[in-house]
Image (cartoon, helix red, strand yellow):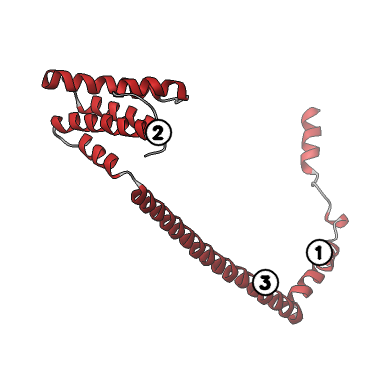
Amino acid sequence: MEQTVVQSVLDKPLFTPAYLNIEFVFSKIIEYTKPIIDFFSNPETWSTIGVISALLSVILLAIIIFSLVRMVEIQIYDKKEIEHEIHEALMREKEREKNANPRWHYILTLIESPNESDWRVAIIEADSMMEEVLKEKGLSGETVSELLEGARGSGYRSIQDAWDAHLVRNKIAHDGVDFPISQIEGRRVIRMFQNFFEELGIV
């Protein structure tokens, strides 16, 4: 029985051609697609598309040209700004060199020398320079120690650096070559002198 039912279902077609009008389906397809086909097959459509494309091309070309011109202008401006900054920096450097203390410049040259004896001379010269400056400031005292004592009440923030550097100078002067000193230590001492001189406004 079941086999008969299944066979009966299989024998029936999925659809009956009598109820499917192929011509009607194709006519509807043509009806809906005809405006689209007519639109794209119309010469005026392609003329319009051509005009729009030409206008867009001109606009895009104008944007590209404008961007390139602005890019070149920005590069030229940046180059001028950089050259101006370099020129200003060189002028400031020349001004600093012109106003630089020649004696201090000599001391800095000595401390960068490869010779240990020059490092010692640099520290002694810096201490001597400090003595002269303190006397020019109107401080009283016969020795550098007395001058520094008088400067304690003047509110100098770097007075301790001046004292420490002066103590190293005394060891060099009293012990001579028996007092070992490296270039790193020499630079540190000169830096302490420089801190004090910068506060005094002479370097």
Question: Is tag 2's residue or tag 3's residue first in the polypeptide sequence?
Answer: 3
Mark in the foreground, 3 or 1:
3
In the rendered image, residue 177, in percent from the top left (x then y), is placed at: 11, 22
* Residue pictured at 38% horizontal, 54% vertical: 90
Q: Residue at x 31, y 33 (%)?
A: 132
Residue 138 vs 106, above or below: the answer is above
**Dot 1: within a 10 Å radius of its alpha carbon, few (fewer than 14), some, or many (20 or more) residues?**
few
* Residue 185, percent from left and from top: 24, 24
Query: Crowding at label 3, few (<14), some or many (≥20) Cα neighbours within 10 Å?
Result: few
Q: Where is residue 12 in the image (x, y as percent from the top left)?
A: 81, 44
Q: What element carries label 2?
A: loop
| Residue at 81% from the left image edge and 68% from the top image edge | 30
Query: On the image, which quarter does residue 86 sit in?
Result: bottom left
Which quadrant holds the C terminus?
Answer: top left
* Circle 3: element type: helix
Front in this rendered view, residue 131 or 156: 131
Relative height, residue 98 to residue 60 (above, below): above
**Residue position marked by numbered label 3 in the rendering:** 56
Compared across the picture, whether 163 is left or right of 48 comes to left
Which disc is residue 137 wearing? 2
Quarter holding residue 137 = top left
